[in-house]
Image (tube, grey):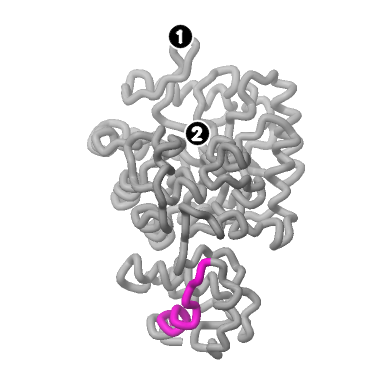
Amino acid sequence: MEYRILGRTGIRVSAVALGCEGFMNKSAEETKADFDHAIARGVNFLDLYSPNPDLRANIGAALDGRRAEFVIQGHIGTAWENGQYLRTRDMEKIVPSFEAQLRQLRTDYLDIGMIHYVDAEDDFRTVFDGEIIRYAQQLKAEGRIRAIGMSSHNPTVARMAVETGIIDVVMFSVNPCYDLLPPNEDVDALWADESYASALHDIDPERERLYNLCAASGVGIDVMKVYGGGDLLSGTNSPFGRAMTPVQAIEYALTRPAVAAVMVGCKSTAEIDAALAWCGATPEERDYASVMTGLDKFTWKGHCMYCGHCAPCSAGIDIAAVNKFYNLTVAQGVIPETVREHYKALPHHASECIECGACESRCPFGVGIVESMRMANEKFGY
C-alpha cells in the first residue's frame, strides 16, 4: 500500500480507501469480514456519508479496538429520518445526527468532519455564512473533529470553499470524463449522455484551477466517483466507448495535483481486491493514456496529463513532476513556497534537459516537452 499525507492535516492515509456504499445492507459479521480483508492489505481510510444507524454501528463494531489506527471521514449535514437518508441544513437535525454518529462508531472524534454535498452557490452561502460552518469550527476547536472538509461535485463551489481558508480537505468527483465538463450545479449533468454528445477538449479550466489551488494551499483532495458510477468500467456505458480498468481509473485520479486518496465503494472482497490491484500494478497496467488517445470526440492535444509516457528521460528528469510543479506556478502567478521546495527536492531539474526530443516522440498527447522544460527552467531558475 502507498500512503500519502492528506494536505496540511498531516494525516497519513492509504491511497486506496473505502467508500461506505459497499457496506450497505450487510450484517455486522459481513461488514467486519470486509474490513478485516481491507485492513490486512493496508487500507486505513474510510468515507462514511450515510447516516444509516445500522451501517454506522456495524462499522463501529468492525473498527472496535483499532480505531486509533484507522482514519474516519464522517459527514456533517446528513440525518436519518423515517428510515431514510436526508441531506439537511437544519441544525436541529445536524447536531443530534453528529452526536449519534460518534456513539454508533464507538469513538469520541472524527478525523475529518466533511460538510456534506455543497454544489450550489446559494447552498455554499447558507453553509459558510451561517451556523453550519461555525459548528464545524467549534467541533474542530474541541478536538471532536481533527480537520474540516467539504464534499462537492462543482469545481467553482469547491474552489470558493478552499478560498475561505477554513477547509482542510475537499472530497471531489475526479475521473477523465467528468474532468472534461464545465462547472454545473446539477450533479446529474456529470453522467447525462447529452453532456458528452458534442466534442470536448482538455480538462475544464475551472477543474484544473481547483486541483492546482488545493495543491498550492495545502488542501488535500480525496476522490469520489472514480469509476463514474461504474460507467467508466464498461465499454458500452463509458462516453469514451472504451472500458477503463479499476487500476487505470484509480491511477488517473491519483496523478491529479493534491489528490491523496481514492474512496472506492466496494460491494465485495473481490471488488476490494480489484481496487487494491493498483498497489502492485505495473506501469503498463496503470497506463490510462491508452484509453484516452485516438478518440473521435475527446482530445487532450498539447496538454500534459502526467501519464508518464515521456519517460525515461535521457537526463533522468521526472518530466511529469516538473510539468505539474510548473503548472502550479502558472495557476498561482507566483511560486508557492511548498512548490519551490518540492521542485528543489527532485533529483534532476528542467535545466538539465538536453533537448534530445525523445520524450516528445513518446508523448501520446503531443505536448511540446522541450519548450515546457525551457519554461520551467526560466520560472524556477534551474
Q: Is residue 235 visible?
A: yes
Could you tell me residue 293's position as x and y percent?
56, 59
The secondary structure that most of the magenta stretch takes on is helix
Report the amino acid beneath label 2. Answer: Gly
Give me the residue at 49% from left, 88% from top: 351
Q: Is residue 337 above or below residue 205?
A: below
Q: Is residue 150 left or right of residue 236?
A: left
Q: Earlier in the sequence, mark 2 or mark 1?
A: 2
Using the image, determine if residue 356 lies above or below residue 143. below
Identify residue type, mark 1.
Asn
Residue at 43% in and 35% down = 192
Q: Quadrant of residue 124?
A: top left
Residue 74 — which label?
Answer: 2
Apparent side of residue 206 relative to residue 372 in the rendered image (left or right): left
User: Which residue is tagged 1?
Assistant: 82
x, y (%) of residue 321?
Answer: 53, 70
